[in-house]
Amino acid sequence: MRKHTLLILLLSLFFPLVVVAQKDDKHNKYDKYLEQKVPENWVIDDAIFEQTLPVDDKWWQKFNDTLLDSIIVIAIDNNYSVLMAMDRMRAAKYALAEAKGAWSPSFELELGWLREQTSGNTSADPQDVLTYSSGQIAMSWEIDIFGTIRNRVRAEKATYNVTKQEYNAAMVSLCAQVATAYFNLREMQQEYEVTERNVKMQWEMVNITQKRYEAGLVSKLDVAQALSSYYSSKSSIPSIEASIIKYANALGVLLGMYPEEIRALVSQPRPLPEYIEPIGVGIPANLLMRRPDIREAEYQIAAQAAELGVTRAEYWPSVYVNGNIGFASHDFNKLFNHKSLTYEIAPTLTWTFFQGTQNLQAVRQQKALLDEYIKQFNYDVLNAVQEVDVAINAYKNSIKQIVALREVVNQGKKTYDLSVDLYKQGLSPFQNVLDAQQSLLEYENSLTEAQGNSLIYLVQLYQSLGGGWGSDK
């Protein structure tokens, strides 16, 4: 009776602890760990930015490019980095479930049968045959009085949340990488078209100089210069084609596709998207709660804090309830008779109350790691604010550059047309035509490059704002 009373008392202490331990932990706000105050607003003096709500997750749809939308969907389904992040998240989920299993008792079933015959020639006792049947269920249960299991569960839960944010970060990075490679590809395709167009114009000038030479109006030098300019521009086409293949293959890796498949998908040139519209950049506090790396750093702190709790719990005793119940009998027919009942209840307490300074040093080690994670968190916050600020200014200045280069291109076309007209009339040397040709090609390529860079800066801005994937998918 005393043993049953002790068992009931231990169980009554244990179940409230289980209920408390299984409640969801409240996730601490990031400002608990901040060492520096986050700016209340971005310093923006441009109408293309609005400090309203954070950017939409599917920011790439704003470019109105259906092919870009399609390949991002393909990348999400097939990218190996994302798939590996998903596997890590699943493994962490199972580890959390395993840790929670420590709250429950473990049971072991043991069944046995023995037949034994003794020798009649080794002693004065007569030869004897002994049979023995047994069956029992053994139980072992750790009572989590001092929070060892509870802190382990907290650590695994935080680790699981870390893997979720790693998955989100992989998704954000993937979408940004796909968009960047795609815009680089479109930029090179547009440069190819610009170069092809200028090569045709230069070939027309070769014909004009040839006719004027045949008419005796100019020297052979004009023809040679026209041909040199033509072949010089034409020689740049293979390197552009190589860049197109390079970016197409980069897309293929991101999409989990082989070169032939991705080239067939993106071989048809498309113009670069025109995107100069107001962009909602949100406020810094919203940014911090969006970015997966910030959340990951915060969950790392929570996981390490729980590990510190596990280490501190080593100072205290561990309480177990062990026991078994079963039947044993020499006569199998009487195995389940009430007289064959056997049981054992053995509450135990183990306490390593002195181990030198090992526990103390272990606690100090875990505390040092916690301090490291807090500093990493503050670094990530500071880095996030700087990334957004750099991206905002890069995109803003790229827009100004595009506006200026468009005017340069317009003036370059007028200069080229005028130089050709004057050359045909014999009022200007051919060198002016060559200079105008080369400048126009340079201006148009610079404009194309600036347009591509502007889109990439915008992608970087969206990425730095934490856009690209939901927070807790």
Image: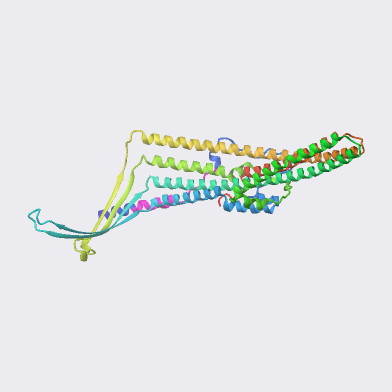
In percent of width and height, residue 362 lies at 40, 36
Farthest residue toward the bottom?
333
Q: Is residue 165 above or below residue 386?
A: below
Residue 285, by quadrant, is top right
Farthest residue toward the left?
124
Residue 48, by quadrant, is top right
The answer to whether 55 appears left or right of 428 in the picture is left
Colouring scheme, one of rainbow, by chain, secondary structure, one colour: rainbow
The answer to whether 330 appears left or right of 153 in the picture is left
Q: Quadrant of the N terminus?
A: bottom left
Q: Nearer the viewer, residue 277 or 200?
A: 200
In percent of width and height, residue 354 lies at 32, 36
Q: Is residue 20 visible?
A: no
Q: Is residue 375 visible?
A: yes
Q: How many marks?
A: 0
The structure residue drawn at horizontal position 53% and vertical position 41%, both measured from the top left corner, is 297
Q: Nearer the viewer, residue 334 or 363?
A: 334
In percent of width and height, residue 21 lies at 43, 49
The main secondary structure of the magenta stretch is helix
The structure residue drawn at horizontal position 66% and vertical position 53%, both measured from the top left corner, is 265
In percent of width and height, residue 473 lies at 56, 52
Q: Which residues are magenta?
A: 11-29
Residue 25 is covered by the magenta coloring: yes
The answer to whether 423 appears left or right of 326 in the picture is right
